[in-house]
C-alpha cells in the first residue's frame, strides 16, 4: 500500500484500467496491484476514452453491455470513485494541451489530477512533463 502521508487520492488513468481488464496485457498484474490501494478515483474521461477506442476499432469489446456491467461491478467492488465532469477540467485541459503538447485525453486526465489534487497513476511518462504544474505521476511499478 502507498503510505497515506505520500498521497491522499490516486487517479487511475485509462491505460491502467485497460491493463486490469485485459488479462493478456503484460501490465495486468501491475495494474491489478493498483486496485489494492485505498482512495482510488477514475477520471470521468476514461469511460469516454474506452468507448471511443472501441468505436474506432482500436479496442475490441465483443459485448459492450456485458463489459459495462463488469466494469460497474469492478468499480463498486474496489470502491473506486468515478468523478463527474466539471467545466474547469476543460479550461485547464486546453491550457495543458497547448503548453505541453499533450494528447486530448492526456490533457483531460492531467487537468482532473490538477484540479482534484490527485496523483495520476499511469504507465504514460507524458505526465512527468507536468511536474512543474504540481501534477505528480505515480508509475504502477512503484507501488
Image (tube, grey):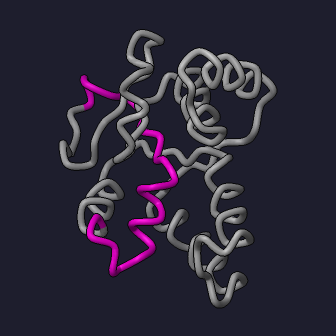
Whole-percent x and y of residue 128? 36, 26
Q: Residue at x 53, y 20 (%)?
A: 100
Q: Residue at x 62, y 42 (%)?
A: 105
Instruction: Read off the magenta span.
Output: 4-27
Q: Quadrant of the C terminus?
A: top left
Please state which of residues 86 and 49 is positioned toward the viewer in this rendering: 49
Is residue 13 shown in magenta? Answer: yes
Q: In the image as oriented, which residue stretches furthest toward the right?
A: 87
Which corner quadrant of the image does residue 87 belong to?
top right
Magenta stretch contains residue 129? no
* Residue at the (61%, 52%) spot, across then down: 46
Residue nearest the viewer, comparing 113 with 129: 129
Q: Residue 22's image quarter?
A: bottom left
Q: Position of residue 97 (x, y in %)?
A: 63, 25
* Residue furthest out toward the bottom: 62
The location of residue 86, given as percent across then percent down, is: 77, 31
Q: Relative to residue 8, is residue 83 depicted above or below?
A: below
Quadrant in the picture for residue 120: top left
Q: Is residue 85 left or right of residue 44?
A: right
Task: Residue at 25% x, 60% y: name it.
Answer: 30
Amino acid at each position: 500500500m502507498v503510505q497515506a502521508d505520500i498521497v491522499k487520492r490516486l487517479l487511475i488513468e485509462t491505460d491502467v484500467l485497460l491493463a486490469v481488464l485485459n488479462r493478456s496485457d503484460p501490465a495486468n498484474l501491475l495494474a491489478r496491484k493498483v486496485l489494492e490501494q485505498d482512495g482510488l478515483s477514475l477520471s470521468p474521461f476514461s469511460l469516454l476514452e474506452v468507448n471511443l477506442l472501441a468505436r474506432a476499432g482500436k479496442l475490441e469489446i465483443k459485448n459492450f453491455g456485458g463489459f459495462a456491467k463488469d466494469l460497474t461491478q469492478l468499480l463498486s467492488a474496489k470502491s473506486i470513485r468515478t468523478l463527474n465532469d466539471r467545466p474547469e477540467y476543460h479550461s485547464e485541459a486546453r491550457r495543458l494541451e497547448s503548453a505541453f503538447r499533450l494528447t486530448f485525453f492526456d490533457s483531460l486526465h492531467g487537468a482532473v489530477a490538477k484540479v482534484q489534487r490527485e496523483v495520476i497513476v499511469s504507465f504514460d511518462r507524458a505526465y512527468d512533463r507536468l511536474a512543474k504544474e504540481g501534477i505528480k505521476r505515480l508509475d504502477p511499478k512503484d507501488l
